[in-house]
Amino acid sequence: MNYWRIKLSLLLNYFVFAILLNSVGTVILQVQNNYGVSASSASVLEAFKDLTIAFVSFIIASYSTRIGYKRAMLIALGVVTLACLLMPQVPGFWTTKLLFAATGASFALIKVSIFATIGLITKDSNEHASFMNFLESFFMIGVLSGYFMFSAFVDDTNPQSTAWLSVYYMLAVISLIAFLLLLSTPVDESSVRHEASKSLADDLGDMFKLAITPVVLVFVMTAFIYVLMEQGIMSWLPTFNSKILKLPISLSIQMASILAASTAAGRFLAGLLLRRLSWYWLLIGCLVVAAGLVLLALPLASSVGDKAVTGWGDAPIAAFIFPMIGLLIAPIYPAINSAILSSLPLRQHGPMAGLIVIFSALGGTTGSIITGHVFEAYGGQTAFYFSLVPIGLLLVLLTIFRRMQARTGVADKLVDVSSGGH
């Protein structure tokens, strides 16, 4: 197989979906301006994305080898290309819902297929881990690129302008390039075709048996609460910047990139620190400092005056401080995933991966909807103060999880957690 072309294709696939998946915060802000929807109504966009990820991931785990990894990725890229073209052609809130539903379903196909394909194109565990790290880093590059890409098409002088929808033509072109590159690249899947013997009922049964294990129950609760907090912040940060900190719309979107950058940095640093430190104490320390950051940054937001903000140089200090929470909460998700996977036999990694995707998606939807309703009813500062609740719950759940692991004799050593993402 032509491995470099396959790897390039996988990277480009992940890049496209990083932009689309993490554009939900930007789009939530824009649909409020363009289509007159309320904050609580806009919050359902997260559900259209995450619930389809959960549902399709639930089903596709059993049938991905039957469909074929390459064919599944081609279907996903084709669907999002068409959805992106539809957005500027038929502008409306329902089209936006359709886009995120298509993106969620397609990402489920992409993620399952990419993770499986990595095993076909890497020679050993070291190369596998290396490419996985690089892939997740490229995902974060896509997240960062998306903020600046969308902000470039926003018209600050006319908040009701739909000019920003033109960005979807660019995304459709990138998706089409990824489609054609993959279509022209041979992928040998013969080594896994014979493994497609288990039925859907068998796969779901394995997942259910694993889910009712006490340590796994605590883990999925921890993952759910973490993603609830992360997505609540990430999805509503552009709106917070615009409505609470009084930034121009394009700058509100751009400055939300600080959260993505600090998250990437946090995962990279955690990968280095966890070679020397206990994962439990590192995460506990991060959560305590994160709570302090919330209590420091949000009062600063209340002191924002009526001074016009034109760029990064005169943005209020709260716009820089609060997004740094990403640096502190970033290690949690990959660390707990690594902890649970390293405690299970290899045959259970598939069902466990399915549970991770499902509960992460459900947590993301719940976090965005709760934050949206609190934002609308009590204001943006109260909505972000709400992050102290999941921080407190995580302190408790991580302690329970750690003790349950100790009782079952699981080693403290983790695999490299610098590659996060969900």
Image (cartoon, grey):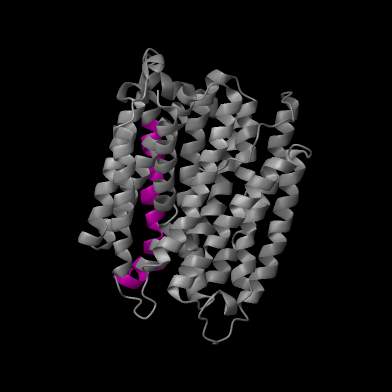
The N terminus, quarter of image = top left
Q: Give the quadrant of residue 8.
A: top left
Q: Is residue 342 left or right of residue 19?
A: right
Residue sitting at the far right: 276
The x, y position of residue 87, in whole percent, is 26, 58
| Residue 45 magenta | yes
Q: Is residue 123 above or below residue 270?
A: above
Please state the extent of the stretch shown in magenta in the rendering.
31-59
Q: Is residue 363 left or right of residue 266?
A: left
* Number of on-image labels: 0
Q: Is residue 112 above or below residue 200?
A: below
Q: Give the quadrant of residue 399.
A: top right
Determine if residue 193 is in view.
Answer: yes
In terms of depth relative to the viewer, which is nearer, 157 or 7?
7
Residue sitting at the far bottom: 306
Q: Is residue 140 above or below residue 69?
A: below
Q: Give the quadrant of residue 341.
A: top right
The residue at 46%/44% (across/down) is 361
Determine if residue 214 is in view.
Answer: no
In terms of depth relative to the viewer, which is nearer, 268 or 105?
268
The residue at 59%/70% (across/down) is 319
The x, y position of residue 163, in whole percent, is 30, 69
The x, y position of residue 73, in whole percent, is 34, 35
* Chief secondary structure of the magenta portion: helix
In terms of depth relative to the viewer, which is nearer, 278 or 186?
186
| Residue 135 magenta | no
The residue at 48%/72% (across/down) is 251
The x, y position of residue 104, in whole percent, is 37, 44
